[in-house]
Amino acid sequence: MNISELAKAAQTTTDAIRYYEKQGLLGIPLRKDNGYRFYQQEDIRRVEFIRRAQTLGFSLREIKEVIPELLHGQLNRTDLEALLKNKIEQIDEKIKALNLLRKGLIDTFGLLKCSVDEPLSITQATP
């Protein structure tokens, strides 16, 4: 299949496919005599894996590190659970940081000392 067929099958764009190739997430595709890329069924599964992992919060760098282990059968359930638990911990830390940021913004509302329609100076905008 060509790149547009792969993109359609994996529900993504040809630009995403090219980007994944450039980042080393997809192997170098075979080329037909006319120079067009030629993809195989396993490429669909790999793109779907990449996209699913991204929706779960994994970076392309993290995904790239795991793909060779998956391809060579070197990743087991325990390894996958560890990766998922690590990602959950990272998300929990981000949630804590965002909650602190949210609290800071709410506190800032209470410190504002100007009228609603008054133009602000730097001093007034920095409680």
Image (spheres, grey):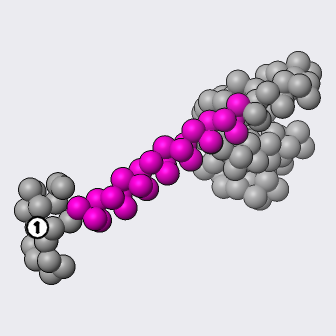
Residue 28 in view: no
Q: For the point 66% across and 51% down, which residue is it?
A: 14
Q: Which residues are magenta?
A: 86-111
Q: For the point 41% across and 55% down, which residue is it?
A: 103
Vertical side of 21 occupied by 12: above or below: below
**Left or right placement of residue 71 versus residue 112 in this view:** right
Residue situated in front as seen by the camera: 4 or 111: 111
Q: Is residue 21 magenta?
A: no
* Among the 4 quarters of the image, the one containing residue 49: top right
Vertical side of 6 occupied by 46: above or below: above
Q: For the point 49% across and 51% down, which residue is it?
A: 99
**Left or right placement of residue 5 versus residue 108 in this view:** right
Pinpoint residue 121: horizontal percent, then vertical percent: 7, 62
* Among the 4 quarters of the image, the one containing residue 89: top right
Q: For the point 11% across and 61% down, which residue is it?
A: 124
Q: Amino acid at mark 1?
A: Leu
In the rendered image, which residue does mark 1 sit on? 120
Image quarter where the C terminus lies is bottom left
